[in-house]
Image (spheres, rainbow, N blue to C red):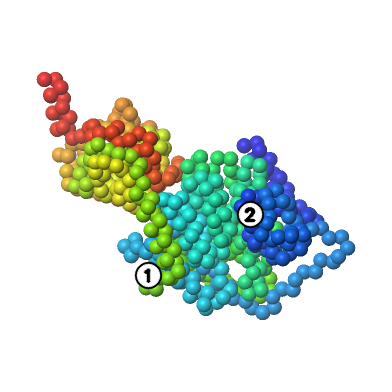
Amino acid sequence: MKNRKILIFVLTFVLVISTMVMPAFAESYTVKSGDVLWRIAETYGVTIDQLVELNNIANRDLIYPGDVLQIPGTVEETDEEVVEEPAVDEEVKITIVHTNDTHARVVEDGYAGNIGLAKVATIIENEKAENPNTLVLDAGDALHGQTIATLNEGESIINVFNAMGYDAMTAGNHDFNYGKERLLELADMADFPILAANVYAANYENFLPEYVIKEVGGVKVGIFGLATPETKFKSHPKNTEGLEFFDSVIIAKLMVAELESKTDVIVALSHLGMDPSSIERSDIVAENVDGIDLIVDGHSHTVLEEGMMIRDTMIVQAGEYDKYVGIVEMVVKGKEVKSITPRLVSAEVGVALEAHPDVMEVISEVEEANALITEVVVGSTEIELNGAREFVRTGETNLGNLITDAMVDFTGADVALTNGGGIRDSIAVGDITVGDVITVLPFGNYVVTIDVTGAELKEALEHGYSAYPESLGAFPHISGMEVVIDPSQEVGSRVVEVMVNGEELDMEATYSLATNDFLAAGGDDYTMFGDNELTALYPGLDEILIEYIKEYGTEGSPVEGRIQTVDEVSYLYLNTVA
């Protein structure tokens, strides 16, 4: 904490003096493993030829880790007068196509309402045909969330984004879900930079590039990234060990000071969101930082049909799951943005388009490759694991117990609860493959933890068992607790006993509950969870179950009376006494 305060002080001090002394500093870059010259040039807004000439590089295809490159335009000049490039005199129209929080929704799904990335690619192609001065940006949370992504730890999404022609993205909290080292590997695979100016490694070096400068129609557009500090708990904490997420307002001011002399337009590519529960948000950045023309936002899944203007900064965000595609039309003259006009392309419009053939080809290749992964064996079972619809929506099953036990084991929560409607199939005797688990849990839900009171937990159980013995998708499978219900009582008064880890439920106490993101958001009418703040986010439920089966097998979660009726309890009691 002390080091963090010291660094924030230093960053603030640098911000104060930067506008006075910044031109006097020579800027250099130390080559890292995996670097290529074109990407370094793009990051700093210079050409490869300029880098080659200034650094006397003999072979532009050979640079080595540890090489120190001087960056053109940043070396201190003593005798020569600095001549600024003339500003663009004519009006230039720039189009920005933006997405956010796709959560790997690659394939079109008319039922869910997402357009599908092959048709998003068609939207991009149409915009570029109308205006060649088009940039394509993503505001994060793209690399995780569906099986098509998780099976190859995000590589499939990078391949699709490469084919779609993205120019930059910022790192969302779920983009860290495979771990920080994997995110760096994915960044190396990308034909575009993944940006995060406010994320620092242990040595206080930037974990990812801070910004990129793109020139379109003679206009230089500076784009810097902001990642949410909530990543520290909205991805598994192990994924960000050794990283620090610094104050977004301070970093944004530093980025403006860095970019204002190099660019005509400044864009913040932000995964901060606008959720009132978040401490650091994009609207707060807009309120407190001068010089940002546009914030392309994500994280809060907000639908801004016409954007939101705060002071002189326009904020845009396109909801979630590629249900919308954002379009921003910007008119620039000189170094002044004359107008910014946002709009959204809806799913109704998007799905009516033809899928882009090149992107469809990439998606098909990914699906074929994933088919090989789904055949991988992760364990075996000597008994059928019951996930049949008529059982998981009406009572306790061994598969429901196995899933919730895996949730408790992975998160360390007191109790776990998941809905029977999310369990879609059984697992037969024999080997268990990745594909078997995905068939059981096909929705791409991830696990979260929230703090709940005993009263809220009881309310949730009352809701889940309200239809018993009739079938209900909300029927809760549980771990860490035992419940006795009386179906003869009125709905809302059926739960007569709850034991949590051997002790009676305390209505006033607080318990850590592991559940899935669907229920935590109020899905299946679990509205009692809607206002509870998430304490942590974890990988997909299918991933967690796979790891649990690998570690422990399948024999430890039999049907054991976690959910009983009063008649069953009385019968057991009488037989025990007899």
Tell me which residue sits at (81%, 66%) in the image.
82
Q: Is residue 275 left or right of residue 93?
A: left
Residue 331 in picture, x, y percent from top left = 60, 74
Alpha carbon distance from label 2 to label 1: 38 Å
Judge whether residue 309 can be spotted in this image: no
Q: Mark 1 is on which residue type?
A: Val
Q: In which quarter of the image is residue 212?
A: bottom right
Return the residue nearer the eye: 187 or 361: 361
Residue placed furthest toward the right: 79
Q: Name the residue under label 2.
A: 35
The one nearer the camera, 379 or 548, is: 379
Q: Which residue is depicted at the point 40% across and 47% down?
A: 540
Q: Are marks 2 and 1 in contact (CB under 8 Å)?
A: no
Name the image quarter holding the N terminus: top right
Depth check, front residue: 218 or 54: 54
Q: Which residue lies furthest to the top in this view?
A: 578
Counting residues from the start of the chain, the first of labels 2 and 1 encountered is 2
Is residue 133 depicted above or below 146 in this figure?
below
The answer to whether residue 578 is visible is: yes
Give the residue type that dot 2 points to. Answer: Asp
Q: How crowded is mark 1: few (under 14 residues within 10 Å), some or many (20 or more)?
A: many
Front-lying residue, 248 or 226? 226
Task: Give the secondary structure at mark 2.
Answer: loop
Query: Which residue shows up at 59% across the image and 55% down it?
Result: 195
**Residue 32: image x %, image y %?**
65, 50
Q: How many labels does the image show?
A: 2
Q: What element carries label 1?
A: loop
Give the crowd class for mark 2: few <14, some 14-19, many >=20 residues within 10 Å. some
Q: Using the image, tell me which numbered label, if any, was put on residue 351.
A: 1
